[in-house]
Image (cartoon, coloured by chain):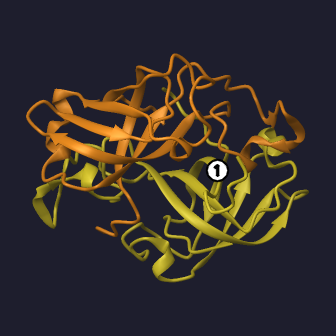
Chain colours: A yellow, B orange
Amino acid sequence: MQCEPIGTVSTPFETTSDAPSQGFHEDSAGVVHVDEAYAAGLSGFDAESVVVVWWADRADRSVLTLDRDPSRGVFTSRSPARPNPVCLTECRVVDVDLDARRLSVRGVDMADGSPVIDLKASLRERVD
Amino acid sequence: MQCEPIGTVSTPFETTSDAPSQGFHEDSAGVVHVDEAYAAGLSGFDAESVVVVWWADRADRSVLTLDRDPSRGVFTSRSPARPNPVCLTECRVVDVDLDARRLSVRGVDMADGSPVIDLKASLRERVD
């Protein structure tokens, strides 16, 4: 189950620890950059929110319980440190530039430069 | 970015096409089986809902636009066919058996036997 990045996300945060827990607590600005090879995947994109599926590439994959509470396992949380550090952040979309393959978003909590695995329609939009 | 399965999910559906679009439209029953190596990740699990992150292992990864509407790219949808077929299904949890490492859930839409990559706390629970 090998993932290939479809792009990256730029954020104000050097590490996931610098970021707010669950981006919606704040409204930090970021940019999703989609690689040229995946440009067609953005066709017709006009949603007001999007789920960014990203890879916490600096996370500890050996962690199974929470540092702050070892009686709780990682599957009870959304902490990036987990066996497969696939993370989900629902962001507001404030601008779409399809030619440049850029989505300007708010509510980011990723470490700057994190690989993006996927972008999904927000369930609030119910486009499927 | 290699993922290792943490378990599998059993569902009534042979393929993702057999399943309802976005599991919450129906309330189909399934079971998440967590592998022994990841049992500690379930410690203290008692939530009423969970986000199952699964891999659509039979999906077409070469797809960038939607069959039913080629003017729309896959990043505007939740269709399993996408470059990285990491799928998200939020399920109700109806029973937790930590010894057997089984979560009985409702609202499944995965193909039976799909690998599970991760389990995440539901945002409704706000446990983080």
Above or below, A64 against A97 in this view is above
Residue A103 position within the rendered picture, expressed as x and y whole percent measured from the top left: 75, 64
Q: Nearer the viewer, residue A110 or B39?
A: B39
Question: What subunit carries mark 1?
Answer: A
- Spot the residue most to the bottom: A26
Q: Residue at x 74, y 51 (%)?
A: A34
Q: At numbered mark 1, what does the secondary structure look like: helix, strand or loop?
A: strand
- Spot the residue most to the front: B26
Above or below, B85 against B112 in this view is below
Q: A56 left or right of B35?
A: right
Q: How many marks?
A: 1
Q: Residue at x 67, y 37 (%)?
A: B79
Q: A92 left or right of B115?
A: right
Residue B21 position within the rendered picture, expressed as x and y whole percent measured from the top left: 62, 38
Work out whether residue B126 can be spotted: yes
Q: Nearer the viewer, residue A92 or B101?
A: B101
Q: Nearer the viewer, residue A109 or B99?
A: B99
Residue A48 position within the rendered picture, expressed as x and y whole percent measured from the top left: 73, 68
Q: Quadrant of the image for the C terminus of chain B? A: bottom left
Q: A110 left or right of A61?
A: right
Q: Residue at x 44, y 22 (%)?
A: B12
Q: Which residue has dot 1 on it? A: A120
Question: Looking at numbered disc 1 in the image, what kind of residue is underneath it?
Answer: Lys
Work out whether residue B6 can be spotted: no
Residue B27 position within the rendered picture, expressed as x and y whole percent measured from the top left: 45, 41
How would you rate the neighbour count of disc 1 (Cα within 10 Å): few for under 14, some for 14-19, many for 20 or more?
many
Q: Residue at x 42, y 67 (%)?
A: A15
Quadrant of residue A6 within the rendered picture? top right
